[in-house]
Image (cartoon, grey):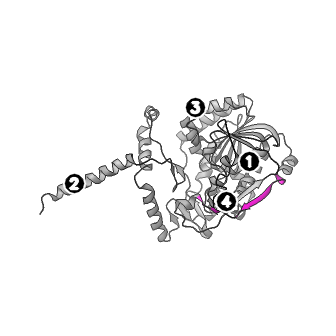
Amino acid sequence: MNKNKPKIVAISFLIIVFGFFILNFSLPKKKLSITENRNLAKFPTIENFKKGNYIDKFEEYFNDHFAFRDEMISINTKSQASLNKTKVGNYYLGKDNWILGMFPKVLNQNQLNRYEKSINYLSVLSKDMGKDVYFTMMPHKSNMLKHLYPKYVDNISNIDINLKNFKSRLNQDSIKYIDMDEYFLSNYSNKERENLYFKTDHHWTGYGAFEGFKMMASNMDLGLSKQDLRNHFNSYKKSIVTNKKFVGSYNQNIDMLIKENEYVVYMTKDNQDYSFDINGKEKEERQVYATKRSDKKWDYGGAYIRGAQTNILTVKNPKALLDKKILIFRDSYQAPTTLLFADMFNEVEIVDPRNINSIDKTYKDMIEESNADVVMFMYNSSGFDSMIDAMIDKGIV
């Protein structure tokens, strides 16, 4: 028996372990996971150490930046799909090429307390400054299409539970809650709701966003009659772009396993006069909106607007219906409504909490410095908690 064999094995093992350790910290760090369509965790800071969550944040960072992580996720995804499973990775594969996401966990009391404190503080602050305040909850695809999920999925009520618990904690004297989830479920059939969402992406279509926008505007105190709103929305035209390949976020996350032709829809109004600037710097429309318009393929963000273009985005339109300004804290579901807002408000200010770390302002600062008549928190019903977490991490006051 070779007496050196255990040493060779031990040394080889240590080389592999330390080799991966060195790789994890030497390879270039990505900000975004294409396969998961999300921002990756950042290296923890001194602030995390002060808050007592340094170890948790470091673990998130290490897991997100593990060497060859995306490649291993891809291999696992393909192996699961080859077995004809209805669940591949973090997705369910339904009939007719529907890709469906996972449901979130039920929010605990500590989380709800954090969200309540932050949103109520900002709503009271805004209300005291004479601003109207709204929390618009946009209907996430998973909550609208529960009927498409496999029968064995048992947590389909989680979003409804979270919405009910969150809504009950809002200060109704300072903020109005606009519940699109309930509206969509009550006013559209299962088949009609399917027509409002992409099959291979986690977002609604431009037409679905338009339907949601109409409901939202009808529930705001804008000084407009029902006939005013009806005339405004009846003037929109629907156009479909069929000469580009659409890359759905869910499909991209599972290595484009699903072959489905989907098209981007725009709802547009003629004779508008938009101007754009990002954080005070003037931009052309194509630098902000539909930035992938010249490409052969595009994703949802490239067809509408990405969060990176909303740090902080101001859109002005002197031909808008109202001589009012709105400040919107948004997530990606808001994207197709950007120009819809600009058609209604002559000035629109849009902020994505995930993309303003370089801006030295708290949310209190942003609200106080804006001369907006309306402040709106506009988040989707599955991920609103992560957006408020991002706000808290940035700094409420």
Dot 1 falls on a residue whose secondary structure is: helix
| Place of residue 246 in the rendered image (x, y in percent of width and height, measured from the top left) | 63, 61
Residue corresponding to mark 3: 360
Q: Which mark is residue 197?
A: 4
Nearer the observer: mark 2 or 1; the answer is 1
Decide: few, some or many residues near mark 3? Use Cα within 10 Å; few <14, some 14-19, many ≥20.
few
Dot 2 falls on a residue whose secondary structure is: helix
| Place of residue 119 in the rendered image (x, y in percent of width and height, measured from the top left) | 63, 36
| Place of residue 349 in the rendered image (x, y in percent of width and height, measured from the top left) | 70, 39
Q: Is residue 244 magenta?
A: yes
Q: Earlier in the sequence, mark 2 or mark 4?
A: 2
Name the residue type under label 3. Answer: Asp
Do callouts 2 and 3 mark residues in contact (Cβ within 8 Å)?
A: no
Residue corresponding to mark 1: 339
Would residue 176 be found to the left or right of residue 67 on screen?
right
Would residue 317 be found to the left or right of residue 9 on screen?
right
Task: Kindly tell me whether residue 37 is visible in this rendering.
Answer: yes
Distance, label 2 to label 3, CA atoms, is 50 Å
Distance, label 3 to label 4, CA atoms, is 36 Å
Q: Is residue 110 magenta?
A: no
Residue at the spot 44% in from the left edge and 63% down from the top edge? 76
Do callouts 3 and 1 mark residues in contact (Cβ within 8 Å)?
A: no
In the rendered structure, which segment of residues is drawn in magenta?
Answer: 233-248
Distance, label 4 to label 1, CA atoms, is 19 Å
Residue at the spot 71% in from the left edge and 34% down from the top edge? 174
Distance, label 3 to label 1, CA atoms, is 27 Å
